[in-house]
Amino acid sequence: MKFATRFAPSPTGPLHLGHAYSALLAHDMAKAASGTFHLRIDDIDQSRSRRSWEIQIFDDLAWLGIDWPQPVWRQSERLPTYRKALEQLWNRGLLYPCTCTRADIRAAASAPQEGAPLHGPDGLIYPGTCRPDTPPTGPMPDTPLRLDMRRALAEVDSPITFEETGTGPSGETGHIEPADMVTNVGDVALARTGMGASYHLSIVCDDADQAITHVIRGQDLYSATQIHVLLQRLLDLPTPTYHHHRLIRDEHGKRLAKRDDARAIATYRDEGKSPADIRAMVGL
Ligand code: GLU
Ligand code: ZN
């Protein structure tokens, strides 16, 4: 299959050095493999996404010497696709409605069983407050929905592995113990308030529909990959090869965040830096 990768930023702030590294690395790897580099806009969270940031992203990436085919996919234009995937899971009894707020979850999660982690790939691990004893029936409601992790894992018989050509933050490679996902991940949200689908559900659909063969992204997303691979199994979608790369950190060793405007590509451009300077700064 022809190599295809993607860079999928959320238009919620300026691109910084960490994004530049991720995009340049993916673009370089696509070029080296005579493959395709797609730019995709992860604007599933419409409350935080801005068209002005999207325009700035296009401009910064083009300045870095990156090119991509048109049209650029936007998650906000793919909601019916995500809905169909959710319906598949709903009809198999793998989802249930849950309108618990973060505060509800915090209150209920404060006393986990001994040894169980409090946080998973999505923040606080959901304590299961709304999980029904028997799967809900009838049409899928238009409410936030969670994946019943125990039921989901029961449907996946083979061990969950994936090809990892980079590493996780602690040197992990693509092996998941399904049983661990109950305690380490829990019942993740797949549809959220005000959003047709969660990040996990939407990117899994996007990667499959865009025939992405290689997902190249930061190690901060390594722990989310087990959710993505599980969803691929449940939805009968192919699993791409994953390459999780090192993170670009500031001088205190802290990972760069969207609010680190000082390290925004736009700021370096204003200061007169060149794309070659940016490459050197991120070690490419
Ligand atoms: N939109 C995600 C982010 O900004 C990227 C998701 C991915 O690469 O899987 O972190
Ligand atoms: Zn709930």
Image (tube, rainbow, N blue to C red):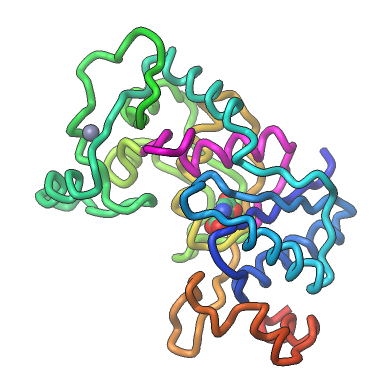
For image coordinates 50% across by 84% down, the residue present is: 250
For image coordinates 44% across by 65% down, the residue present is: 170
For this rendering, which residue is in front, 95 or 236?
Answer: 95
Asked if the magenta segment contains residue 149, the reply would be no
Total number of numbered labels?
0
- In this view, the residue farthest toward the top is 138
User: Image check: 57 left or right of 169?
Assistant: right
Quadrant into which the N terminus falls: top right
User: Image check: 25 left or right of 17?
Assistant: right
For image coordinates 54% across by 60% down, the residue present is: 12
Residue 264 percent coordinates (x, y):
60, 78
User: Image check: 56 left or right of 274?
Assistant: left
Asked if the magenta segment contains residue 200, the reply would be yes
Q: Which segment did they paint magenta?
A: 189-216
Quadrant into which the C terminus falls: bottom right
The answer to whether residue 20 is above or below residue 141 is below
Q: Quadrant of residue 188?
A: top left
For this rendering, which residue is in front, 278 or 284?
Answer: 278
